[in-house]
Image: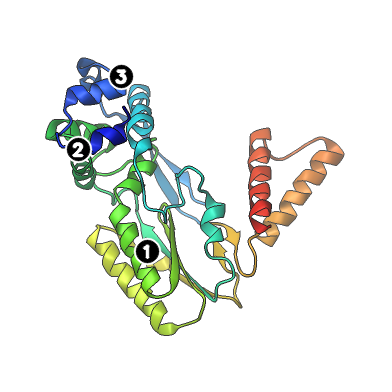
Amino acid sequence: MGFFDWIIGKSEKKLKDLCSFLKVSENEIRQIYPEYREFSLAKRSGGSRRIFSPSESLKAIQNRIKDRLLGHLGSHKSCRGFESGESIVTNALSHVDKAVIIKIDVRDFFHSTTSERIECYFRKIGWNKESAKLLTQLTTYNGFLPQGAPTSPRLSNLVNYRLDARLDGLAKSLDADYTRYADDMTFSLSADDPVKIQLILSSTRKILLEYGYRPNKKKLKVLRQHQQQKVTGLIVNKKLQLPRQKRKWLRAVKHRLLTTGRCSLSPKQLQGWNGLEKMVQAKKK
């Protein structure tokens, strides 16, 4: 019996049920201490991002929670990040050839997703108070979702189902499209309507605040077709494609590899870029 079958039952699931599902003993799971190593990573757009790397024992149980428990639960259809079958390509594809692109970045997205909301979510899906509290302790840190824990991306989608549903509903009411890739929210309109644009901006801000999030004013963008419209790093003006500079750079990298046998990228990095290029080409057809 899968976890989905469990959560539709009437009775709350207890700690022994959780241990059975994760295949660990009560003693083993209680001895896991939420320990993280904190460091910073530079952002491409400037500044830095705080990363919290869990200890080996904590990471192991988080992976079990992610695979055995969270993997069976559904996020909203507008989610494009950290979801099976979704990517930056499918995210951008929803906004190709639109008159207006509205990009809204959520400030401190993971840090603003609180432990209280996570515990409430675990309670709502059927765990009793003790189990929900323990699951929250194992997946949050200092009151928020730690960016770097394997459970955080999935939990950020699951706990924000209602948020995404409301924003998707807002978009549909204005004949717009909406997607979210982690902290990047994108709306697009087929017609340049200033009234609808303002309604999207004001209503989204209000809804975000209700869930404890704040839009990053510095990263807010309203892009029209005479400008370069970029969504999760891909150009969407008339067709889906990599930015011109990236295409030129990738051709140069491949040419150098072919003529000299040397490459500035590792085999894994080159494989990743080739995979992205193929995904983009496939979606263009």
Q: Give percent across and percent down for residue 54.
A: 36, 30
In the rendered view of the protein, which quadrant contains the N terminus? top left
* Residue 83 higher or lower than 283, as above or below: above
Q: Helix, strand, or loop for circle 3?
A: loop
Task: Kindly identify which residue carries mark 1.
Answer: 168
Q: Residues within 10 Å of mark 2 (few under 14, many from 20)?
A: some
Whether label 3 touches label 1, CB < 8 Å? no
Is 136 on the left or on the right of 244, as rendered? left
Nearer the observer, 26 or 284: 284
Quadrant in which the C terminus appears: bottom right
Report how far apart the C-alphas of labels 3 and 1 lie in the structure.
Answer: 38 Å
How far from the left and from the top, in percent, is residue 66? Answer: 36, 33
Residue drawn at x 60%, y 65% is: 236
Callout 3: few (<14), some (14-19), or many (20+) C-alpha neighbours within 10 Å? few
Q: CA distance from mark 3 to mark 2?
A: 18 Å
The picture places residue 20, in percent across and down from the top left corner, at 26, 20
Disc 3 or disc 2, which is closer to the eye? 2
Residue 13 falls in image quadrant:
top left
Within 10 Å of disc 1 (Cα), the crowding (few <14, some 14-19, many 20+) is many
Among the two numbered marks 3 and 2 on one chain, the one whose residue lies closer to the N terminus: 3
In the picture, the disc for residue 126 is 2
At label 2, the amino acid type is Gly
The residue at which mark 3 appears reads as 23
Residue at the location (41% across, 78% down)? 197
Q: Is residue 131 above or below residue 113?
A: above
- What x and y, as percent, mark residue 134? 20, 31
